[in-house]
Amino acid sequence: MNATRLARWTAVTAGAAIFVGIAGAAVAEEQHGDEAVDVSVSIAQIDEPGVLAMSIAGTTTTLVENGSDALVRQFTGSLPTVTVTDTRDPGDIPAGVGWYVLGSSSAFAGDAGQPAIGADHLGWTPRLIDGGDAGLVTEGDPVQTVLDTTAPDPFGLVDQELFAMALDSAAIAAEGQWTATADLTLRTPADVAPGSYSGTVTLSLFE
């Protein structure tokens, strides 16, 4: 930086950013060469045992009104994609064990003190997205709500319900990954109190 530019820099208090831009445009810097640095990294193989794990592509979903009639308000949506991953060596998995994912829901609480909507009003239909080439991963059965006339007892996602499963973990471990979702249906009486409600669907992976 030359003496003239240094003097101008030190004299300015307010508007310094604007001044620097103008000075830079008026007096071009002179380049005196380039130097480059090559960056390298060595990543060692992880020899620790693999794991069976589950992840969900998002923490929220929104239900929208769809299919209501004079007696029942109906709201539908779907879970974010659920992924089960198995990085274990098949030889390290005990024979005869399988994994399964169960799901349940809390009640839906109103944001303004409305009466809660019970978990028995929420049903789902699990659906495989990618069940692997072996076809040994299956989705759980549909669960209907308390307002479905054909619904069995118990109704809704009050208790843990089957989302997806594999009967033999070792047989499919080489596939490595499987994905699924579930179509959600919330059914309430037509006179349900208006307002915003929220609940939580909890998914758990077991083996």
Image: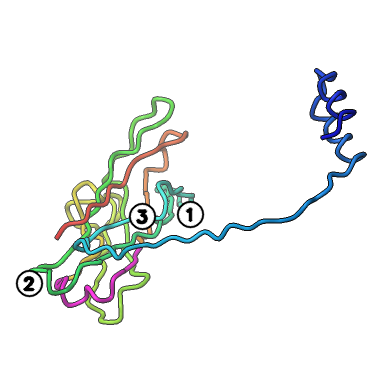
Per the image, label 3 sits on a secondary structure element best described as: strand
C-alpha separation, residue under disc 1 versus residue under disc 2: 43 Å
Number of marks present in the image shown: 3
Q: Residues within 10 Å of mark 1 (few under 14, many from 20)?
A: few
Q: Residues within 10 Å of mark 2 (few under 14, many from 20)?
A: few
Residue drawn at the location 32% of the way across and 57% of the way down: 124
List the residue tagged with mark 1. 66
Q: Which residues are magenta?
A: 167-180
Quarter holding the N terminus?
top right
Q: Nearer the viewer, residue 117 or 101?
A: 101
C-alpha separation, residue under disc 1 versus residue under disc 3: 25 Å
Is 169 within the magenta? yes
The three-letter amino acid code for the residue at tag 3 is Ile
| Disc 1 versus disc 2: nearer the observer | 2
Residue at the far right in the pictured view: 26
List the residue tagged with mark 2. 96
Which is more N-terminal, label 2 or label 1? 1
Per the image, label 2 sits on a secondary structure element best described as: loop
List the residue tagged with mark 3. 56
Q: Nearer the viewer, residue 189 or 88?
A: 88
